[in-house]
């Protein structure tokens, strides 16, 4: 990790394997280097600390110590306490593939001033 301190990090080569899917199609599976995973984990922890305070109490997706089962438990409690007229279940297929990454980075610049960290996020 001494490269992190010297700010000479670049992404390592990604190993890509083509794997079959149940429906007969194939999809690429990228295996990242350990060094890249370490950087991604560090960036994830920094971003989680920054954004955690902005999340509402009923947000459960991709948050530390919260998950789908916690969301279902909260839903069961809410249904038991109040009259519920409708429940919405949504699966956003390919959502992260459709995000405008330039807009996302511009939004992150509102919270993160350190250009080195922003470059790490772009590479991750």
Image (spheres, rainbow, N blue to C red):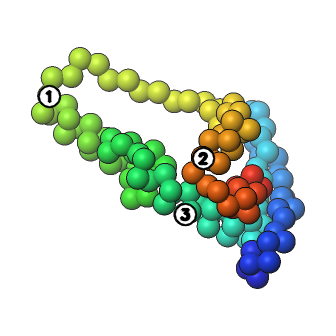
* Above or below: residue 63 compared with residue 34: above
**Residue for point 72% across, 39% down:** 101
Q: Earlier in the sequence, mark 3 or mark 1?
A: 3
Residue furthest bottom in the image = 2
* Above or below: residue 115 compared with residue 28: below
What's the mark number on residue 110? 2
Q: Nearer the viewer, mark 2 or mark 1?
A: 2
Residue 1: quadrant of the picture: bottom right
Q: Residues within 10 Å of mark 2 (few under 14, many from 20)?
A: few
Cβ atoms under marks 3 and 1 closer than 8 Å: no
Q: Nearer the viewer, residue 119 or 61?
A: 119
Residue 115, x across and y down, in percent: 73, 59
**Residue for point 69% across, 44% down:** 105
Q: Nearer the viewer, mark 3 or mark 1?
A: 3
Residue 3: quadrant of the picture: bottom right
Looking at the rendered structure, the secondary structure element under dot 3 is: helix
Residue 74: quadrant of the picture: top left
Regarding residue 71, the answer to whether it shows in the image is no
Q: CA distance from mark 3 to mark 2?
A: 18 Å
Regarding residue 40, the answer to whether it shows in the image is yes
Please give the residue where the numbered disc 3 appears in the rendered image: 45
Q: Earlier in the sequence, mark 2 or mark 1?
A: 1
Cβ atoms under marks 2 and 1 closer than 8 Å: no
Residue 5, x across and y down, in percent: 74, 78
* Above or below: residue 122 compared with residue 120: above
Q: Nearer the viewer, residue 54 or 61?
A: 54
Residue furthest right in the image = 13
Q: CA distance from mark 3 to mark 1?
A: 36 Å
**Residue for point 33% across, 41% down:** 58
Please give the residue where the numbered disc 1 appears in the rendered image: 82
Q: Residues within 10 Å of mark 1 (few under 14, many from 20)?
A: few
């Amino acid at each position: 990790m001494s490269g992190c301190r010297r700010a000479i990090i670049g992404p390592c080569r990604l190993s890509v394997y083509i794997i079959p899917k149940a429906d007969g199609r194939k999809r690429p599976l990228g295996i990242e280097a350990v060094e890249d995973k370490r950087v991604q984990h560090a960036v994830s922890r920094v971003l989680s600390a920054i954004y955690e305070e902005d999340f509402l109490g009923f947000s459960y997706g991709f948050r530390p110590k919260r998950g789908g089962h916690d969301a279902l438990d909260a839903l069961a409690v809410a249904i038991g306490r109040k009259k519920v007229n409708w429940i919405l279940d949504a699966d956003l297929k390919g959502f992260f593939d459709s995000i405008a990454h330039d807009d996302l980075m511009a939004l992150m610049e509102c919270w993160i001033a350190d250009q080195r960290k922003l470059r790490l996020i772009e590479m991750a």
